[in-house]
Amino acid sequence: MRHNHGYRKLGRTSSHRAALLKNLSIAIIKAGKIETTLPKAKELRSYVEKLITRARKGDSQAHRAIFASLQDKESVKKLIGEIAPKFVGVNGGYVRIIKTRTRKGDAAQMAYIELTK
């Protein structure tokens, strides 16, 4: 049972899961909206919202912390320069998940995950 477990394992090792979340978060920052499976989207939501909350400060320490998580200069600049200023007066809820379809190959529930503003 997974009562009060805290995160989804997504059928991966911890390093694979960390790389997956990093790559998905880079994709959502660059594109604004991506389609993925529902469990991945739900796990990605908390990861991205923590990054945006950190980016709202906009100081050099925020740059360092976000670059340590993402390791992509282009997406760090976009997150701190364009995305985070839109959410200055908002406390959370930066990401929206919309359930879309069932994938034909394996019947996985798919969802769009997008930035709200």
Image (cartoon, helix red, strand yellow):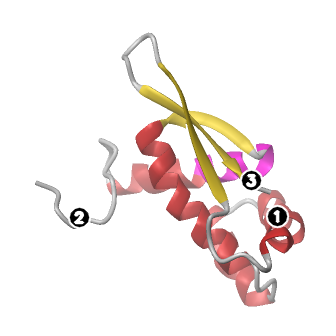
The residue identified by callout 2 is: 5
State the residue at coordinates (79%, 48%): 30
Q: How far across and how far down the image is residue 110, in percent?
A: 50, 29
Q: Quadrant of the C terminus?
A: bottom right
Could you tell me what secondary structure mostly forms the magenta stretch? helix
Q: Are marks 2 and 3 in contact (CB under 8 Å)?
A: no
Give the amino acid at mark 1: Ile
Q: Secondary structure at mark 1?
A: helix
Give the amino acid at mark 2: His
The residue identified by callout 3 is: 29
Viewer-side label of 2, 3: 2
Determine if the magenta segment contains residue 87.
Answer: no
Q: How far across and how far down the image is residue 94, in percent?
A: 67, 62
Of the two numbered discs 1 and 3 on the same chain, state the one appearing first in sequence.
3
State the separation of the CA atoms marked 1 and 3.
8 Å
Give the residues drawn in magenta, as a range. Answer: 23-31
Q: Residues within 10 Å of mark 3 (few under 14, many from 20)?
A: many
Q: How many marks overall?
A: 3
